Image (cartoon, rainbow, N blue to C red):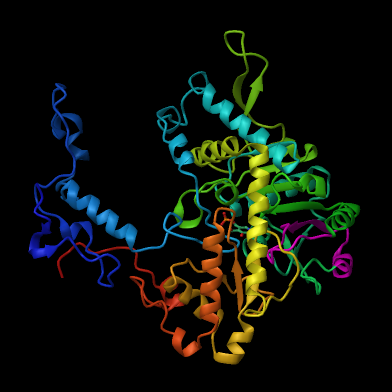
Amino acid sequence: MSTGSAPGGRATSAPLMGRDPEPTLFELSSPGRTAANFRATGVPEWSAEELVPAGALRDEPTPVAEVSERDLVAHMTRLSHRQFSVDLGAYPLGSCTMKYNPKLCDDAVARAGLADVHPASPPALTQGWMALLADLEDALCRITGMAAATLQPPAGAAGELTGLLLMRAFHGAGGQGGRRRRVLIPDSAHGTNPASVTLGGYEVTQVPSDARGCVDLDALAARLDDDVAGIMLTNPNTLGLFEEDIVAIAGAVHEVGGLLYYDGANLNAILGVTRPGDMGFDIVHMNLHKTFAVPHGGGGPGAGPVAVTDRLAPYLPGPRPVRTAEGPSGGGDAYEWAYPEHSIGRAHSWHGNALALARAWSYILANGGDGLARVSQAAVLNANWLRHRLRGTYDIPYDRPCMHELVASATNLKRARGLRALDVAKRMLEEGFHAPTTYFPLVVEEALMIEPTETESPQTLAAMADALIRIAAGTGDDAHAAPRTSPVGRVDEARAARQLIPTWDARPT
Ligand SMILES: Cc1ncc(COP(=O)(O)O)c(C=O)c1O
């Protein structure tokens, strides 16, 4: 039984949410303690010397922390309490949304039949997995109005690059690879869009937004020519507004031979209501880790499948799970791995982040088509409810019905009382909410991008609005020191990003 205290008299019962640095597991270590508890199996024990060639053996044992199960669990639990998480409270981070993820999806992917399968297992042993992936491809195509998909890309940005390489392959096959060198992007676009265009070997041409916060059609027309490979758009755009002229935009881009790329990071606003394919898009990536229950960002591996229309399907990455006529015993479908005819190759090792894909599939099945439509409807309703509550307190630069997120501005507060978007965000942590996205999109000064998501109750939404209104009534002087109640106070963000020290030196000083 552990005594609950580490060598050197260090207590392991540090107060939750304290500001002292948490001891590392190595500092809690004590020789001989162990968190493992194996029963004797009767299998003879082999020594390291009998199993490993002498030349490959270490001189010293690997230094591992030796702690009891009790101390290990307490340590991990304390760490988990030192940060805000979707399981703790509302997380209105716009655009890069962290949605509450149903526990059902955790449960589904923890099953041994999914979790314990090696990706190199032969197709004869993985028909169930392949059926799941093929069914997911079909569902994503139905949801987006596309013909075929790849599940390989591991994130939205990876999906973007894959989509641009598909664009390049398509134009190259049409003998226009050299001529088509520009990709158009609106000025409200997410930063990954221009980065992906550059990585994909194209030049970025920016298109300004108009007074409604949408693509300026005249400016678009002035930039369209036969050297345009395509346009990248997200709809709703990053101002949370629906591009109402999307059909005209699609017509104009197709007219000059360009393709339309849909950044699907905002797909959670339109599920079951409209589809990128119906709007005229040719290539779509989806952030499954936003729309379909996979944790986003630091929360876990993502998935950014790409779906395309018929004419781009031959270029998709491979291998893909393909249905053959009949199962081996003559009944049902059977599957094999195959590369599309003119495939651009792999976008990721094996079959992508397979468990993230299975998780998304469980979310889609659990909701069904009508449930997915309700997800989007509730997300849009919640964002508009919040927009109404904040109106008059915060500037709302484009104050018309929004989709799943709203973009407010702290410009009025900065002018009146020195309160900036950053101060509002840090004060939200003190109020028990995660901060909204700040300073994005770049076209809005002192931007606060708030995505309440579909899962928050009216009570939570009201509490969030009350907190934002309470914060706005304060001054910058009050708020500059925020957050004062979290384990880490306000950090110098540039220094924290540039001089991050993610290692710990185990040698005694
Ligand atoms: C509009 C938009 N596009 C692209 C991305 C990139 O996605 P990822 O972070 O998965 O690379 C994001 C991030 O959430 C986004 O909000």
**Residue at the (66%, 80%) spot, across then down:** 392
**Residue at the (51%, 39%) spot, across then down:** 359
Q: Position of residue 494 (x, y in %)?
A: 46, 76
Q: Is residue 217 above or below residue 381?
A: below
Ligand 1's quadrant is bottom right
Toward which corner of the image does residue 398 lie, by quadrant? bottom right
Viewer-closest of 157 and 507: 157
Horizontal placement of 72 versus 451: left or right? Answer: left
Viewer-closest of 276 and 200: 276
Viewer-closest of 240 and 201: 240
Horizontal placement of 360 versus 88: left or right? Answer: right
Q: Is residue 183 magenta?
A: no
Q: Residue furthest front?
A: 459
Q: Is residue 100 above or below residue 24?
A: above
Residue segment shown in magenta: 217-244
Q: Position of residue 48 (x, y in %)?
A: 16, 34
**Residue at the (54%, 90%) spot, across then down:** 418
- Visible in this render: residue 320? no
Quadrant where the C terminus sits is: bottom left
Horizontal placement of 121 versus 79: left or right? Answer: right
**Residue at the (18%, 49%) spot, across then down:** 70
